[in-house]
Amino acid sequence: MDHVQHWIDGALSTKESHRVGEIFNPATGVVTGNVAFADEAQVDEAVKVAARAFDEWRHSSLTKRVQVLFAFRELVNTNKEKIAALITSEHGKVLSDAAGEVTRGLEVVEFACGIPHLLKGGFSEEVSTGVDVYSIRQPLGPVAIISPFNFPAMVPMWFFPVAIAAGNTVIVKPSEKDPSAIMFIAKLWKEAGLPDGVFNVVHGDKVAVDALLTHPGIKSISFVGSTPIAKYVYETGTKSGKRVQALGGAKNHMVVLPDADLDLAADAAINAGFGSAGERCMAISALVAVGPIADTLIEKITARMANLKTGDGTKGADMGPLVTKIHRDKVAGYIAAGEAQGATVVVDGRNVEVAGDGFWLGPTLFDNVTSEMSLYQDEIFGPVLSVLRVNTYDEALALVNEHPYGNGTAIFTNDGGAARRFQNEVEVGMVGINVPIPVPMAYYSFGGWKNSLFGDSHAHGTEGVHFFTRGKVVTSRWLDPSHGGINLGFPQNS
Ligand code: NAD
């Protein structure tokens, strides 16, 4: 049985925690290990270590930082399959998907390798006689990253490469459900030559999170998780004077216009609806069919669903189990509620047959879903796709814009003008045009609107660099040897 410990100051913690959480393999339902839960004192120890390491790391040259980042990039790339295997064993997603999340995380490492360019400031010579002004960006100090279960490698990697490249030190609090991938990554940082204490991991639950949110030594919080916790983290962290970016839940709509390529749209609906068992914050869960295409589209989706294999993610399945039994039962509860509220069950995932005691639920398709049903109102975070039928583009747009979440959305159409109008009018942070999961590349920023983000900084890209640095402007005068006399006047151009 594995025991997962905190990683502090470049080593596994030797202090035992009083509380632990169980780790399951969701494909077998078996407990495979447990993870230490940090208390306030253990969080405090990690923060003190990170503060000490900051004094040195912030003064390490950009050249040195980039060399470490390059070495780390190579190590993660070489070990991608091992990290993917750890993810699958605790999360349940299929191996190819787990390797895919490592690849997307690596893109942020590659972006952060350009930190010397990203940190360049401006310089204005001679703003007044003999006076120059320039801007610089400096690191914040120890920063905290609190991440969800569904991307145990990629989501922390949205933040820590940029934070570390900019000269900060980091404490990651991963999800207690799948804590092993980040431990492997911590060891790779050490192998890459990152000084001890720059990258730390504390495990735990609300106790550890609260300790980070209120610790005076933590300068910023990057949180990703469900909306109620994101809101709580934002409010508590900002009340403690910290910079906070808190990314929350989602309910992503895919709008299909009558002129769309319906085979492309059906492929996209399968991929974005059921990939990773719908446990993606960019999953499509509401498919809005505009005009007369709904029957044909549903036929095409249903035919494709018949070929989807649900099973152990290490054994060639298309879709793995859900992360826990509790979550599986919650999603099955939404299916029952949808049926009771009058939606039509086209494919019922509760009937899926897979050997073993894994947390199984097959892909599920609903038709005739309406906006007041819980299937539509709530984030379900499972393999459940709801079709809503509307008559016009305007009705489709209103649905998306009136929904409280605003993470991602997609439109499928062959009409460039309609797509352009949608991109302009839709109130959502990330938009796909004939692309179902529009996760931005690392040099753009990731994040939603409305209840999908609390704070005003998205992840990575230039917003990430700004989040992890503070601006400073220097006005400098080097006296000309010919200077003489005292001037008490207010500084102004002469
Ligand atoms: P979660 O909110 O339950 O947990 C997220 C983190 O918060 C974990 O580290 C957890 O330990 C901690 N936490 C849980 N309860 C807490 C509490 N009461 N007080 C303090 N901390 C607490 O989310 P999850 O179930 O792990 O992940 C799924 C959610 O994450 C979904 O809602 C999904 O949409 C969201 N998500 C959003 C994005 C995005 O970019 N917007 C990306 C990935 C996941």
Image: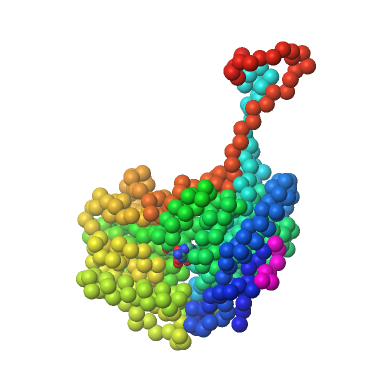
Residue 288 versus residue 260: which sits nearer the camera?
Answer: 288
Residue in the picture at 61% in, 32% down: 473
Q: Residue 20 appears in which quarter of the rendering?
A: bottom right
Residue 494 versus residue 70: which sits nearer the camera?
Answer: 494
Please state the horizontal and vertical placement of residue 64, each as a whole percent of the image. Answer: 74, 50
Q: Which residues are magenta?
A: 9-15
Residue 56 versus residue 209: which sits nearer the camera?
Answer: 209
- Report the side of 405 relative to 128 (left or right): left
Residue in the picture at 46% in, 80% down: 311
- Report the side of 380 relative to 168 (left or right): left
The verdict on residue 13 being magenta is: yes
Q: Residue 321 appears in which quarter of the rendering?
A: bottom left
Q: Which quarter of the image is occupied by the N terminus?
A: bottom right
Please state the horizontal and vertical placement of residue 175, each as a whole percent of the image. Answer: 52, 67
Q: Pick out the residue farthest to the right.
A: 481
Query: Visible in this render: residue 305?
Result: no
